[in-house]
Structures are given as structure tokens and as C-alpha cells.
Image (tube, rainbow, N blue to C red):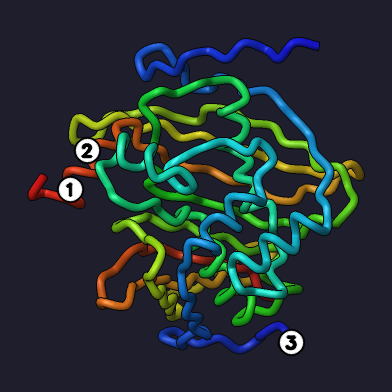
Amino acid sequence: MAEPELKIFSYETIEIGEELGSYDYILTQKMVDAFRTSVDDPDASFPTLGVKHDATAFAMVYTDPIGTVNAGNEVEFFNPPIVGKKIIVKGRVADKYLRRDKPYIVIEATATDEDGRLLEKLSTYQLKKPDELGKKWHPEQ
Amino acid sequence: MASRTVIEPGQSIPSVTKAITEKSILGFESTGILNLENIHNNPELAAERLGTTYTLASGRMSITFATECLRKFFGPEVFNHTGTVNLKFLRPVKAGDTITVTGAVSGSEDIDEGTRVSVDIFCDNQDGNRTAIGIGTAIIK
């Protein structure tokens, strides 16, 4: 089956409330182990943070040649995911706004497992003009 | 750790200190399901989009570090089911950095489900520069 064609992201045309659809995957022990090793926490309970549910939902719909910088995250935890279970993620565009003439969008995702357990809700504030931050970090350039 | 039932304003939460390495950054990215190239795993993309000479650690790594502090403070039975983390990212984090996450109880509010406790969260690098700031919460009975 052919992959769905990605839309090219445009701040001007993306709509607040726009659904990013849903996807699912199986959480494997390998994913959990890789996540826990990367954050040096053998008890880390939400490897789903490494999957970046909201950004993944966005990337399944949009291609973004300009790129993005994560300006902030909000996450709510409800139940830790269980290895071997299917995780179902639904994403949407929660907001977009200009701050100091810089474009931001807010994407969010809600994850449940195959048994209907609510796992986490995650939002990301994405700055859609990453070169602006580069200038701030390297003002001499 | 057992869930805490006595929490006082100003009380410090357990801190964590994490060495950020190229391996940990790439390991975190490997948890994802799309295998996309981005400013965290592709130096050329980071240079093109940000003008940096290095890849950046995902801000979600700092979210995870803050989650560890809060889980240790509230206990997993509380935090993994009622916890939240909200961080704003202030500076880039890269390989070679050491990030220390600290926090202190900032307030509490009685709600129907119990008492929502708020914790101010700070992430600082080895030079004493603040890389992220935010709030965590959990609901205790």
C-alpha cells in the first residue's frame, strides 16, 4: 500500500483544531530499554516520551522543510504503558500564535492502550522559525 | 519510596544530575517509531536550521529528568497516575553538558481528588546557566 502523501507545512494555512489523525504501535522491551539507558533511569515509567507522540502525529501528516525548535512541553501522566500492548495515539493542532513576530504552533497527543487505559497527554510548543534561536545562541554569527 | 502524605512549602525534591552524551542523545531518538532525521540526530540539519556546530538534546530528555525527580518525591504510585510536568526550554543542551534538575514545593490546592501539590522545577547546566524552568504537580490524598 502506498504511503499517504505528506502535506507541506505552512503556518498561514494550518488550522487550530485540525486533527492529525491517529496511529498505533506496539511498545517493545527494546524500546523501553533504549529509553531507560538514554536517560540513565532504570525505573523510567514513560518511554512514550521518547516516541514523541505529538511530533510523530504531526510528522505523519506534514513535512516541514523549515524545521522546528521545541520551546516547551506539557505532559500529564495517567497510567504507565505496558510492554507488549498496542498504544493508540490521536493528535491535533491545539493552537497557533505569533509571539514577538515569531510563529508558534501547539500540537498535542493523547495516548491510550489497547485496553482503553489512558496513558498520557502531551503537548509541545513548537517555534516554527528555528534560525531565530540559532541567532540568539550565536549572536556573533 | 512510599507515597508522601506530609509535604511542606519550600521542601526540596530529590535532584538528579545527568551527563549528556552523543550516545544518550541518539539513544533517546532511537526510541521513536519513525526513524526521522532531525536536529537531534543529524549535525548537518542542526547546522542548516540552527547554525549550530552540534546536535541538540531533545527537550523531552529534560522532561524525563524532571519526571524522575518528581516520581522519587511523590512516589510512583502517586506521580505515575496523577503527575504533570510543564517545562519551558531556555537554552540548548548538547553532548558534553551536565544537567542538574532541582525543585522545591511551591504550593498546594485542595481539589475534589485530594490535594494538588505544585513544585517549581529548574534545570541548570555545568556552567550554572538555566536551560529549562517549569512546574510539576501531583495529587496526594
Q: Quadrant of the N terminus of chain A?
A: top right
Look at the picture and state if B79 lies above or below B34.
Answer: below
Q: Are marks 3 and 1 in contact (CB under 8 Å)?
A: no
Please tell me how crowded label 1 is: few (under 14), some (14-19), or many (20+) other residues with Cα within 10 Å: few
Q: Which of pointers 3 and 2 indicates the residue nearer the eye?
A: 2
Of residues B59 and A125, the one drawn nearer to the viewer in this rendering: B59
Q: Which mark is residue A136?
A: 1
Q: Nearer the viewer, residue A97 or A72?
A: A72
- Where residue A83 appears, x then y in whole percent? 86, 56
The count of marks equals 3
Query: Label 2 sits on what residue type?
Result: Glu
Are labels 3 and 2 on one chain? no
Residue tagged 3: B2
Q: Position of residue B2 (x, y in %)?
A: 74, 87
Spot occupied by residue B121 in the image (x, y as percentages of width and height): 42, 71
Q: Tag 3: residue type?
A: Ala
Residue matched to label 2:
A132
**Amino acid type at image mark 1:** Lys
Chain of the residue on which disc 1 is drawn: A
- Indicate left or right for B80 with A55 as reference: right
Q: CA distance from mark 3 to mark 1?
A: 44 Å
Secondary-structure class at tag 2:
helix
- Say which residue appears at 37% left-offset and 70% top-offset: B97
In this rendering, is residue B91 above or below A107?
below
Residue drawn where x is 40% and y is 75% of the image: B98
Q: Eyeballing the image, is B119 above or below A59? A: below
**Which one is closest to the eye, mark 3 or mark 1?**
1
The chain letter for the residue carrying disc 2 is: A
